[in-house]
Amino acid sequence: MDVEHLEAEAKATAAKHVANMLQRPDQLEKVEQYKRRVIRKKASVEAMLKTAMQSQLDGVKTGLSHLETALSDIKEIKQNLRDIEDSFKEIPRLVEKLQDVREESLKHSQYAAAMENLKHIFNVPESVQKTQEWISDGKLLLAHQCLADLENSRDDLLFEMHKLPNQSPTDRNMLKQYFSDVEKLSEDLGKQLWLILRRTLNSVRKEPQVIVTALRIIEREVRADEAAIARQQTTGFMPTGRPKRWKKRCFEILEMSVQDRIEGNQFEERSQNKMWLVRHLEVTRQLILEDLKVVKTACVPCFPPSYDIVEKFVKMYHDSLSKHLQDIISNQLEGNEYITLLNWLNVYESSELMGHPDLMIDVKKYGSLLDNTVVENLICRYVSMLETNYQDWMKNTVMSDVKDWRNDAEPEADSEGYFHTSLPVIMFQMIDQHIQVAKTVNQELVERVLMVSIEQVVSVTRLYKEAIVEYKTKHFEDRSQLRYFTHYMIAIANNCLQFGELATRLRQRYWKSGSHDNEAEKIFQRAMTVFESLKMDTLGYLEDELFLDLDKEINDLLTKKWMLSSTNIVDTICATVEDYCHDYTHLWPRNFDLLISGIQNRVAKGYITAILQK
């Protein structure tokens, strides 16, 4: 730093400051006051500077002291490391010198273990017999305590043999043979526990202490497994029969009991009762509902919290039920059994079962009871079966209606006197029944059933049309045989209108806008076209029948016969049309208007043709 330059700058600044302070003569009187103020400020700054310098000096002094101490410690540590390195050189010789001591220590350890377990070794047969009696008498806690003592004695002795550098297989096998009954006792005790756990849902309401006892034993075995695994990690020794994994086995037994309960409530076969599946699923619903109520109320106090027993039981029932339903499906369903099963899938999640106020279980986190592919396959098979049934049933219905055409009686008439047959109502009542059944499953099935139903109605209309043509042909061949031909053709024409109205009504009632709108529109449009075409054909046959009686008179117009005839041919034509119109009044107004319009046009054409040809 340039001290002289800084000093010159300071003096110049001071001169400016003094000049600013003494600009007026009256300010000279305050010179002493300004001077004292500057002196006090200077003294204050000097004091602060001295304090800062002193603080810095003290810090430096402390740092030097710490460095000196650290240096001393480093020297000491360095010396200790040299001493340790020198000591390491002596260790190999010490191992040889202390070999005898090591052997004696090992023998002492073995003798100590033998002495500690001596009474158990001598009393093994007696302890085994006593444990077996306690197991038979149901005193499982006492039996498990005695079993644990026997296992500890065996494992301690085997561990001491494991530590020997030169192990003797003969001694080890002899020791295992001596304690062989201990493993059998463990198996027998386990069988008793599994038997108790299989009856958990029954026992927990009457004898909860039995379940608690079994779970206490299992928890002891869990801790013993953990201790054995920990010792294996440090010593490499694993006792015989460990780990037992009884907790895992516990859940396996509970799951097996759940499977047995679900599969064991089917009391009938299809051959015995056609409603077997309905009854079986209802019994299953009641059983699961009651069992899960027991789990929530009675099992929770008995099972340790770590078991999360409600969650585990729900998962077991869900998985077991899923497997059982798949087994039922694999055995091939028939008829309405598809709907029964599909509807029950909705019941499963509803308030009738898992959503019951006493349970309130969200089963969605366990996945679907049946995969979407399985459900879709069920729906497809049901729709396919329904389509096949429709073909046979609708064919028989049409044939039954056709048979009625040959009856020696008029067709039925409604309250307004319009003829009709029961065919449209019967067909659409059956369709409506199937849709109502599908409605219990979901809207998608409703729409698929509706589309299949309309498609089959359209399909069977071809057969209906063929029967009408055959009926018309036979009548025109011999008009004396079918007395009520006109009446039934009127009924058929009315049926065609009713077909269209019923189809439209079904669509309005059951169809909802969705992804299949275009496909549905095509199907319904095709149905309307078919019904309209069949109606027009039928009205045309009625026209043809009328003109079988009118063609002769129309052809005689403007001929010699017409001029020489004593009767008025035009009056005959009018009378004939009027006579037929008495029957046509049984047509629905729309059909009547169409038919009369057609007849008028055809008569007019006949007159014009007669005038132009003659």
Image (cartoon, grey):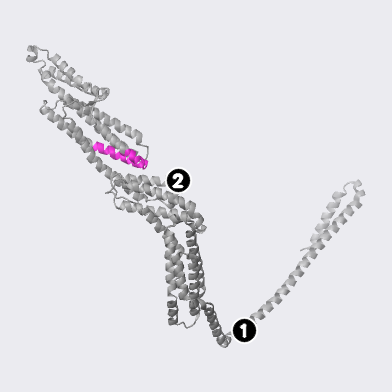
Which amino acid lies under the numbered mark 2 shown in the image of this protein? His
In magenta segment, residue 8: no
Which amino acid lies under the numbered mark 1 shown in the image of this protein? Ser
Can residue 251 be seen here? The reply is: no
Give the x, y percent position of residue 355: 45, 46
Q: Is residue 238 depicted above or below 575 in this figure?
A: below
Q: Is residue 266 depicted above or below 407 in this figure?
A: below
Q: Is residue 475 depicted above or below 103 in this figure?
A: above
Q: Is residue 390 left or right of residue 31?
A: left
Give the x, y percent position of residue 402: 18, 33
Give the x, y percent position of residue 516: 34, 40
Q: Is residue 31 left or right of residue 358?
A: right
Could you give the CA–CA distance between mark 1 and mark 2, rounded to whole angstroms?
77 Å
Which residue: 45% across, 66% down? 135
- Res 61 label: none
The residue where tag 2 is placed is 356
Residue stretch in magenta: 434-459
- Res 87 label: 1
Q: Between 579 and 611, which is closer to the camera in this rendering?
A: 579
Give the x, y percent position of residue 187: 42, 68
